[in-house]
Image (cartoon, rainbow, N blue to C red):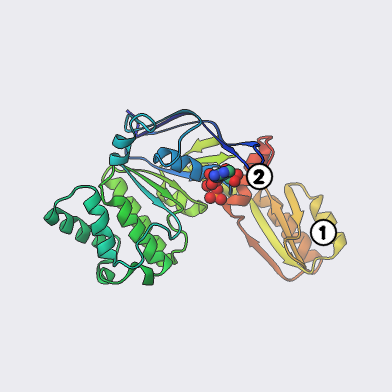
Amino acid sequence: MQALEISGLTRTYRRRGGEEFHALRGLDLDVPRGEVHGLLGPNGAGKTTLCKIVSTVLLPTAGTVRVLGHDVVTDTARVKERLGIVFGGEKGLYERLTARQNLTFWASLYGLGRAARRRRVDELLERVGLADRADERAGDFSRGMKQRLHLARGLVSDPGVLILDEPTVGMDPVAARDFRALVGELRGRGTTVLMTTHDMAEAAALSDRVSLIDRGTLVMTESPAAVGDLVSAYERVDARGVPGRVRESLAGLPGVVSVTSPEEGLTRVETSSPDATLAVQRALVEARVRDVARSRPDLEEVYLHLVGERGMAVGE
Ligand SMILES: Nc1ncnc2c1ncn2[C@@H]1O[C@H](COP(=O)(O)OP(=O)(O)OP(=O)(O)O)[C@@H](O)[C@H]1O
């Protein structure tokens, strides 16, 4: 049995004016037990909609989702017992209660006895690195600390499947690193994790497999190494003070995907091979352009290339 079996999943929203919008279109995905699965995709791809349906917060329009064999529509109670959810953002905490009081409250919802509850709460506070701040009000926490408390909340029931939607948003690099270690630890304990992120490095570091979704359908499911290979083919060169005629000649070089101007005075050249990047840099040096920086595009940009290459329309 798979931890998650998603088949033909479709979700249609009715927008103002009555027009139908398909946020998910016949999506199929299986996630085996114990896998950390990264879900990547541009804004509006349908990631949150998928997470909400898997966690029984939202009903599918068509198709089925099973969590550890239990159908999210007909067996909601069983699914809820086995699933933990951590959504990004700051909602859902009782701001006037302390971290410990928040967790104790949630633990009591799961029917743990007093002693077991205290043990569980202490263990969770320790695990997410909030033991020292346990008796401070959640409302006074930073975003990253709130997010850790959210994670502890998601773990209260010791779930077999954990859904993390943008879990490291707002965390500083140290907190994000600790958080990733925590996900690694969960994986070691056999927890299945479905995690959305915009951060390719994060997905690559944590996931056994990653899925790219766009406009409600699965574009691909691969190992992070395979996606990394695709991503590493793309590079970009940012330069300032590039004369118009040089810009035009850059656009004509082989392997140059696009030449754009994201802000005034800045020329951004995207390439699809290291050779092309080198040729662009050479042309800029020859044109005596000094302010040149080379970098990797973020996932979103690479993603748009990948989706674009597959012949689908991009954007909504
Ligand atoms: N309640 C709603 N009514 C109408 N449309 C909605 C509703 N919720 C989401 N959508 C639309 O469905 C699409 C998918 O949204 P979703 O939040 O699942 O995307 P996402 O991949 O999580 O995006 P992001 O990375 O920005 O969080 C979007 O176009 C969004 O506008």
The three-letter code of the residue at mark 1 reads Arg
Identified at 39% across, 31% down, the residue is 73
For mark 1, what is the residue?
247
The residue sitting at the left extreme is 115
Distance in Å between CA atoms under marks 1 and 2: 21 Å
Identified at 22% across, 52% down, the residue is 108
The three-letter code of the residue at mark 2 reads His
What label sits on residue 305 in the rendered view? 2
Identified at 66% across, 48% down, the residue is 273
SS category of the residue bearing label 1: helix
Marks 1/2 in contact by CB < 8 Å: the verdict is no
Query: In the visual, does 89 lie left or right of 279?
Result: left
Ligand 1 sits in which quadrant?
A: top right
- In the figure, 306 relative to 260: above or below? above
Image spot of residue 266 (x, y percent): 74, 65
Image spot of residue 144 (x, y percent): 41, 65
Identified at 28% across, 71% down, the residue is 133
